[in-house]
Structures are given as structure tokens and as C-alpha cells.
Image (cartoon, rainbow, N blue to C red):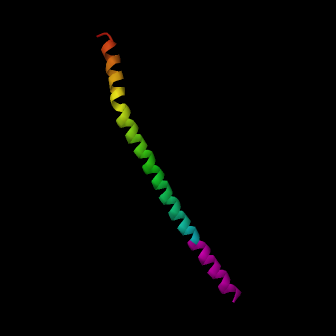
């Protein structure tokens, strides 16, 4: 009887760990998506200003 209880406890513990790994993977996926969205917004907002700055610099170079 003790052996069955031990095996059942092991199986439940193993299944719980698998669920946590899946949840962790989803959390990392959400973080990556959030970081990507921030990068896209930053590039969209700053892109024209950076282009203007480089254009101004190249216009001032001799040649």
C-alpha cells in the first residue's frame, strides 16, 4: 500500500512540474512579444528623427 501511495505522489508531483514548465514558457513568450512591441513602437517614433539627423550630418560633410 505504501508503494502505491509513493508512486501516486511521484506522478502527481511530476505532472505539477510539467504544468509549471508550460506556464513558464507562456510567460517568456508574452515577455518576448511585449519587448518586440516596444521595439517596433520605438523605431516607428524615432525613425524619422534619426533619419533627419543622419541627413543633416551627411549634408555638412565636405565632398
Q: Quadrant of the N terminus?
A: bottom right
| Residue that sits furthest to the bottom in the current view | 1
Which quadrant of the figure has residue 8? bottom right
Q: Residue at x 33, y 12 (%)?
A: 60
Q: Which residues are magenta?
A: 1-15
Q: Residue at x 60, y 76 (%)?
A: 12
Q: Residue at x 49, y 59 (%)?
A: 25
Give the left or right position of residue 57, taking residue 26 as reference: left
Task: From the viewer's side, name the closer residue of 62 and 36.
Answer: 36
| Residue that sits furthest to the top in the current view | 62
Q: In the picture shown, does residue 20 fall above or below 47?
A: below
> How many numbered tags mark residues here?
0
The verdict on residue 29 being magenta is no
Q: Position of residue 20 (x, y in %)?
A: 55, 65
Q: Position of residue 47 (x, y in %)?
A: 35, 32
Q: Main secondary structure of the magenta part?
A: helix
Q: Quadrant of the C terminus?
A: top left
Q: Position of residue 26 (x, y in %)?
A: 48, 59
Give the left or right position of residue 31, taking residue 52 as reference: right
Q: Position of residue 22 (x, y in %)?
A: 50, 64
Give the left or right position of residue 24, taking residue 51 as reference: right
Q: In the picture shown, does residue 61 fall above or below 41?
A: above
Q: In the picture shown, does residue 47 fall above or below 41?
A: above
Which quadrant of the figure has residue 49? top left
Q: Residue at x 58, y 71 (%)?
A: 16
| Residue that sits furthest to the left in the current view | 63
Amino acid at each position: 500500500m505504501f508503494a502505491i501511495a509513493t508512486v501516486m505522489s511521484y506522478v502527481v508531483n511530476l505532472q505539477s512540474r510539467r504544468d509549471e514548465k508550460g506556464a513558464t514558457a507562456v510567460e517568456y513568450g508574452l515577455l518576448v512579444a511585449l519587448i518586440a512591441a516596444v521595439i517596433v513602437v520605438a523605431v516607428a517614433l524615432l525613425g524619422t528623427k534619426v533619419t533627419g539627423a543622419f541627413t543633416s550630418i551627411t549634408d555638412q560633410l565636405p565632398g
